[in-house]
Amino acid sequence: MKDMGEASFILGIQVIRDRKNRTIALSQASYIDKILSRFSMQDSKKGMLPFRHGIKLSKEQVPKSEHEEQFMSWVPYALVVGSLMYAMLSTRPDICFAVGIVSRFQSKPDSNFQSDSDSRKSTLGSVFTLGGGAVIWRSIKQSCITDSTMVAEYVAACEAAKGAVWLRQFLIDLEVVPNANKQITIYCDNSGAVANLREPRSHKRGKHIERKYHLL
């Protein structure tokens, strides 16, 4: 084994150290540039958001005829999604929702509130930060169908709380983070969900919520 010094790149991820300010950062700028070049999109118009509002994807859009299937066999859809997924999992939580949506349609597929027009299930998302940086994030389709934004946010907060319990115990076991046993604050931007979390009550809009989601 040979010591080659400090790593500057690890699996396509650039490691940026700032000794003066005692910080370390990860970047995949070069990897993303390679993706754009590979799929001839290096000159594409830049957008302000990872997912444009109003775009609706459905299983009704998948190829139905033999001609359509043959045409799509030449489109590197799964390859593009896989390339983006690596960036999403490594350093880009901001594209988590967009990649989660397009990845559902890689092979004849079967929150925002009811974002899946086929199953009517909402998409939940969460991100945990430590020292000002994101350390864990996800965006997945909920396992249940909710009938309001409040309930969808309530379920999402419960799932985030489960992740918070695991994360806190993980940090305690590492013994490298001071005060790791302190409570973790969860932020939710829905006032109805927050009110119900702070003071659970039997209300006509929330009394049907399953008991397993009353974790907080």
Image: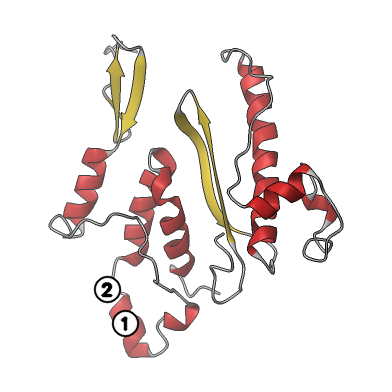
Of 1 and 34, the residue lying toward us: 34
Q: Is residue 107 above or below residue 151?
A: below
Of 81 and 114, the residue lying toward us: 114
**What residue lies at 37% left-to-right and 63% top-to-bottom?**
78
Quarter holding the N terminus is: top left
Residue for badge 1? 70
The x, y position of residue 152, in whole percent, is: 65, 59
What amino acid is labelled 2 in the image?
A: Trp
The x, y position of residue 12, in whole percent, is: 29, 36
Task: Please tell me in which quadrant of the rendered image residue 65 appears.
Answer: bottom left
Of 55 and 139, the residue lying toward us: 55
Of 41 and 64, the residue lying toward us: 41
Return the mark for residue 109: none
Return the mark for residue 74: 2
The x, y position of residue 80, in whole percent, is: 32, 59
**Helix, strand or loop status at disc 1:** helix
Please report contact status of discs 1 and 2: CB closer than 8 Å, yes or no. yes
State left or right for residue 107 relative to residue 116. Answer: left
Q: Is residue 185 above or below residue 48?
A: above
**What residue lies at 53% left-to-right and 47% top-to-bottom?**
138
Please rate how many residues cluster around mark 1, counting C-alpha atoms within 10 Å: few if below 14, some from 14 to 19, many from 20.
Answer: few
What amino acid is labelled 1 in the image?
A: Gln
Label 1, label 2: how far apart the Cα atoms are: 7 Å
**Helix, strand or loop status at disc 2:** loop
State left or right for residue 19 relative to residue 168. Answer: left
Please rate how many residues cluster around mark 2, counting C-alpha atoms within 10 Å: few if below 14, some from 14 to 19, many from 20.
Answer: few
**Given the current orientation, which residue lies at the most extreme right position?**
202
**Given the current orientation, which residue lies at the most extreme left position?**
43
The x, y position of residue 176, in whole percent, is: 56, 13
Q: Is residue 49 above or below residue 64?
A: above
Task: Please tell me in which quadrant of the rendered image residue 112 appears.
Answer: bottom right
Quarter holding the C terminus is: top right
